[in-house]
Image (cartoon, rainbow, N blue to C red):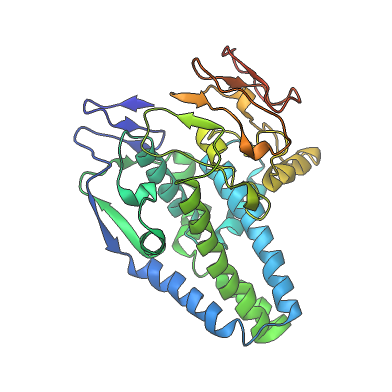
C-alpha cells in the first residue's frame, strides 16, 4: 500500500493520484443495473408463488448453492479478485462463469466494484455508499440500483492477466445474456416453474442476499480483529456462515484479505474452504493461502473474545501491537505476540 502526497491510499489495482478523494461524490441511478435486478425481483415476487413446485424449489436451492459457493465465493472472490490459491485455467474459467451466473455483474465489473469499495474503505474517511452507512432501504437502493460518481476518482488499473483475457472480456460484455441458455434448458426440462425459480428467483435472492450480508457486516456484529486508521471495519455474521458459504466471516476477511480460508478460527463454518480442500485432494487447486502464510496488513489488531468461535473458550484481548494468529495449532485462541517471517502454503 502506498499513499500519495494528500494521504490517499493506493491499492494493488486502484491508484490514488494527487487530489483524489474518497468522500466527495454523487449517487446516481444506474438504469441498466436497476432494471436488471428490479425486473428479476418483480418476476420472482409475482411469478414465484404462481409457479412454485417441489422440483422448482430444489432446482433453486441446488443452482444457488453451486453458483454462490463454487462460482461467486471461490471462483470470483477468493481466486479472480484475491488470487488466494491457484487453479488450472479451465477450472478457473468454469468457476468464474458460474460466479457470473449469480447475476451481480460481469467478472471484470465484479473486480472493479470490489476493489473500488475496498480502496475507499481503506482510507481514513469514505463516502456513505462505500461504508454502507445509509439506513436499510436507502442502502438497498444505493447498492443495487445506483452507482457512485466520485468527484475526484482514483484510477482503476487491472493487471494484464485480467485486462487482456479474451474470455473475461467476452463474459463481461454478455454477462446478462449468460442466463439465456440456462433458462432455455430449464424451460425445456421443467417448464415455467423451472424457468422462474431457476433464473428469476435465484438471481433476485442471490443479489439481494449479497447486499444484505454486506450491509450488516460493515456496520455491526462480533469482531475478532480491528484495523486501525481505516474508514470502515469488517464484522462477522456467524448465523449465516453456512448459507453464505463462509462469506459471512467478513471481519476475518478484512483482517486477512489474501486468505483463501475465511472461517479462520476453530468452529467457524466455511463451506467455500471445504470445497477448496476437496479440490486440493483431487489435485485441482494448489497454493491455498491462510493467515499464517501472509504478512499482517497495516494497523491490524487482535481483539478480545472471538464470539464467532462459539466453543466456550475465552480469548484474552491483545494489549500491545497486532497479534499473529497460529490457526494450525488447534487452540481456539492461539496467537503469538511476534510476527515471524510467514511461510508459504503447500
For this orientation, the residue located farthest to the right is 281
In the depicted view, which residue is nearer to us: 290 or 330? 330
Name the side, left or right, on which 107 lies relative to 245. Answer: left
Q: Quadrant of the N terminus?
A: top left
Q: What is the quadrant of residue 189 in the picture? A: bottom right
Q: Is residue 183 visible?
A: yes
In the depicted view, which residue is nearer to us: 331 or 13? 331
Name above or below for residue 83 compared with residue 114: above
Name the side, left or right, on which 175 lies relative to 335. Answer: left
- Looking at the picture, how far across and down is residue 332, in whole percent? 71, 28
Name above or below for residue 334 compared with residue 288: above
Q: Residue at x 56, y 75 (%)?
A: 200
Q: Is residue 143 visible?
A: no
- Looking at the picture, how far across and down is residue 337, in whole percent? 58, 13
For this orientation, the residue located farthest to the bottom is 50
Q: Residue at x 53, y 44 (%)?
A: 221
Name above or below for residue 304 compared with residue 40: above
- Looking at the picture, how far across and down is residue 153, in whole percent? 26, 44
- Looking at the picture, how far across and down is residue 95, in whole percent? 63, 52
Q: Quadrant of the C terminus?
A: top right
Amino acid at each position: 500500500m502506498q499513499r500519495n502526497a494528500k494521504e490517499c491510499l493506493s491499492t494493488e489495482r486502484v491508484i490514488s493520484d494527487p487530489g483524489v478523494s474518497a468522500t466527495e461524490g454523487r449517487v446516481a441511478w444506474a438504469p441498466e443495473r436497476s432494471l436488471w435486478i428490479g425486473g428479476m425481483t418483480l418476476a420472482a415476487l409475482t411469478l414465484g408463488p404462481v409457479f412454485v413446485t417441489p422440483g422448482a424449489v430444489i432446482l433453486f436451492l441446488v443452482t444457488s448453492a453451486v453458483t454462490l459457493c463454487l462460482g461467486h465465493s471461490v471462483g470470483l472472490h477468493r481466486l479472480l479478485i484475491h488470487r488466494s490459491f491457484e487453479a488450472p485455467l479451465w477450472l478457473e474459467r468454469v468457476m468464474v462463469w458460474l460466479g457470473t451466473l449469480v447475476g451481480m455483474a460481469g467478472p471484470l465489473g465484479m473486480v472493479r466494484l470490489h476493489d473500488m469499495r475496498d480502496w475507499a474503505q481503506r482510507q481514513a474517511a469514505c463516502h456513505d455508499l462505500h461504508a454502507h452507512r445509509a439506513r436499510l432501504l436507502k442502502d438497498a437502493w444505493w447498492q443495487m440500483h445506483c452507482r457512485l460518481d466520485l468527484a475526484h476518482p482514483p484510477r482503476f488499473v487491472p493487471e494484464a492477466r485480467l485486462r487482456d483475457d479474451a474470455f473475461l472480456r467476452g463474459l463481461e460484455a454478455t454477462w446478462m445474456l449468460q442466463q439465456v441458455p440456462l433458462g432455455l434448458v430449464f424451460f425445456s426440462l421443467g417448464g415455467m416453474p423451472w424457468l422462474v425459480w431457476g433464473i428469476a428467483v435465484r438471481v433476485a435472492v442471490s443479489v439481494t442476499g449479497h447486499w444484505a450480508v454486506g450491509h450488516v457486516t460493515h456496520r455491526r456484529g462480533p469482531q475478532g480483529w480491528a484495523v486501525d486508521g481505516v474508514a470502515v471495519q469488517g464484522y462477522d455474521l456467524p448465523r449465516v456462515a453456512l448459507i453464505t458459504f463462509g462469506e459471512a466471516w467478513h471481519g476475518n476477511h478484512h483482517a486477512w484479505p489474501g486468505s483463501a480460508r475465511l472461517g479462520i478460527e476453530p468452529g467457524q463454518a466455511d463451506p467455500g474452504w471445504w470445497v477448496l480442500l476437496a479440490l486440493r485432494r483431487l489435485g485441482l487447486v494448489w497454493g491455498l493461502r491462510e493467515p499464517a502464510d501472509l504478512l499482517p496488513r497495516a494497523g491490524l489488531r487482535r481483539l478480545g473474545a472471538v464470539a464467532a468461535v462459539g466453543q466456550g473458550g475465552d480469548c484474552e484481548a491483545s494489549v500491545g501491537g497486532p497479534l499473529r494468529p497460529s490457526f494450525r495449532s488447534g487452540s481456539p485462541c492461539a496467537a503469538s505476540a511476534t510476527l515471524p517471517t510467514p511461510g508459504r502454503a503447500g
